[in-house]
Amino acid sequence: MGQPEIEAKLDSKELRQLKQRIVLRSTIGYLTEEESRRYIDYRLRLAGSSSSKVFTPEALSLICRYSRGIPLSINIQCNKAFGIGYRLSRKRIDPSIVKKVNKSSSKKISVSAIALVCLVVIIILLGREYIKSTSEKQALQASVQRSMVVGKIPILPPESNDLTSQNSLNLALNDKPSVSLPQPKAKKPIKKFVKVKEGDTLSSLSKRYYSQANITLIDKILMSNPEITNPHLIKTNQTIQIPDITEDSLIIESPDRAFKVHLGTFLRADLAKQYRDEADLEGKEIEIVSRKISAQETWYMALAGEFDSREECLKTIRILRSKGLLPALIVPPPKIKWTI
């Protein structure tokens, strides 16, 4: 697989021996607008979506026009549009986003340089010392077949014979989650049932099972045990559920399939407002929810949302976790044991 110039190089006198050892040589030209649309739609259907869900009709027409039927250019246009759409929190790619893609490009792709960019040339160099048996030739053919598949899934359907040689080009759909991908299933939380011993508190139980104690973790325990009406008072021999704290446990899903992230629980409302200036939550509403945990005490939950998918929530959670902004998922420093 290479640029169009490789054909001229292969035809040169100096490379005639190399040319004789080419196993397969295939070329396709420009795609029509209809073929371009089918190409985009098929790739999105592999990801569980479709072009009508991701692009407006006008945006699709612009991509087909700007790419001029060159599959690599289609890939680049779609990939950059997904990136801009994700940053703007758009549910569909519209013409304004496609225009931004082409406006922001510092260098225009030369049509003459990539007119045959989809040329697929599988070159196999075999010296005489490698061609000794039929079995080696069969192994060679098997490697050629494997190289015609991207991620073990053909890019285009078998009936699209005019496009099958494009299988080595990949429309990068995984960089940004603006595509409506199948939603990962929520992991069923694991809960430990423990019996309260004399002297136990929610703070000590949190340290025992989570290796740390803070208001957010104690609030998670309270939410799993609504019968506890005072976080500072638990009864000996009382059975308490200790929930498993994972990234998924911070996601709150509403009945209408909207998602929010539980950022943390705090003693004061002003502490919960710290997330409003966080760049990675730009465009998301930071909601402060008061929780009456006892007759005398109120705590404050910080929620971010809404998110379109569970996967989008998880990406945001991982970013905030790496910055140490999620109290429930902060890893405590290791304990140092001194020996004399």
Image: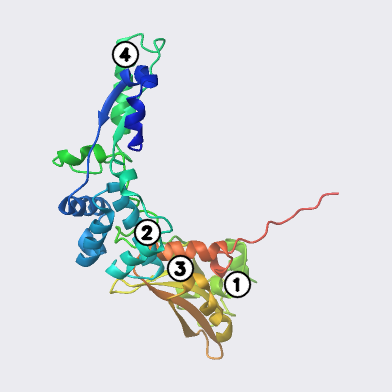
Taking the spot 32% from the left edge, 66% from the top edge, the residue there is 99
Q: Amino acid at mark 4?
A: Ser
Dividing the picture into quadrants, the one containing residue 163 is: top left
Taking the spot 28% from the left edge, 58% from the top edge, the residue there is 66
- Mark 1 or 2: in front is 2
Q: Amino acid at mark 1?
A: Asn
**Residue furthest right as drawn:** 340
Taking the spot 22% from the left edge, 41% from the top edge, the residue there is 29
Q: Which residue is mark 3?
A: 250
Q: Which badge, 4 or 3, is on the more N-terminal residue? A: 4
- Mark 1 or 3: in front is 3
Q: For numbered disc 1, what is the local secondary structure?
A: loop
Q: Is residue 157 left or right of residue 22?
A: left
Cα separation, mark 1 vs mark 3, equals: 15 Å
- Mark 3 or 2: in front is 2
Q: Position of residue 181 (x, y in %)?
A: 30, 58
Q: Is residue 78 left or right of residue 230?
A: left
Q: Which residue is mark 4?
A: 135
Cα separation, mark 1 vs mark 2, equals: 41 Å
Q: For numbered disc 2, what is the local secondary structure?
A: helix
Q: Which residue is mark 2?
A: 80
Q: Which badge, 4 or 2, is on the more N-terminal residue? A: 2
